[in-house]
Amino acid sequence: MIDSVRDRATFRRLRTQGNRGRSGPIRAIYLPHDGPNVEVAFAIGRKFGSAVQRNRARRRIQAALRDETVLVAPGAYLFSCHPEVMTMPFASLLTEVQRCVDLCETRSLSKADRAQ
């Protein structure tokens, strides 16, 4: 189940403690938490394009996250992207989103190993 990030504290922790990943035109910050939910937020600025373009990019990434082939660990994610997200085929978008999520999660695991 995918929810929206709602509280300011989660945004603050994403910015300061989150694990960053980038794959192609997609960037993400991941913050693991206990619980079964995936919380997602987007940071797509006005330089990206019009509101219609920003919303379309957001919906494309949301659709990729909901796709059954993309495996997402529970936690909070903050996604941003470049305008080329609009023109890439959906299959490529799925691949890039999965790589980005995997990279964030891998960095989270390596941080946990270093802490022990």
Image: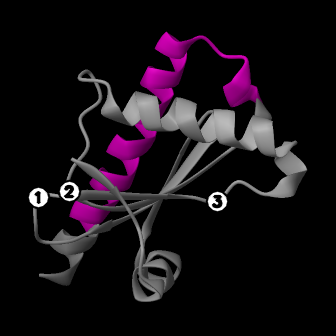
Q: Which residues are magenta?
A: 84-110
Is residue 115 left or right of 8 when viewed as pictured? left
Which residue position holds label 1?
Answer: 36
Q: Which residue is mark 2?
A: 74
Residue under label 3: 43
Asked whether residue 25 appears in the rendered view, the answer is no
Instruction: Name the residue rendered at 48%, 86% in the picture.
Output: 8
Residue 28 as seen in the image, left or right of residue 64: right
Find residue 72 and report its image quarter.
Answer: top left
Residue 90 is a magenta residue: yes
Under circle 3, the secondary element is loop
Count of numbered circles in the view: 3
Pick the front one: 20 or 2: 2
Give the amino acid type for the residue marked by disc 1 in the picture. Pro
Residues tagged 2 and 1 counted as in contact (Cβ below 8 A): yes
Q: Does the magenta run of residues contain 50? A: no
Amino acid bearing label 2: Pro
Depth check: give the residue in front, 43 or 17: 43
Which of the two labelled residues, at mark 2 and mark 1, occupies the earlier sequence position? 1
Marks 2/1: CA–CA distance: 6 Å
Q: Amino acid at mark 3?
A: Ala
Q: Is residue 62 visible?
A: yes
Earlier in the chain: of badge 1 and badge 3, it is 1
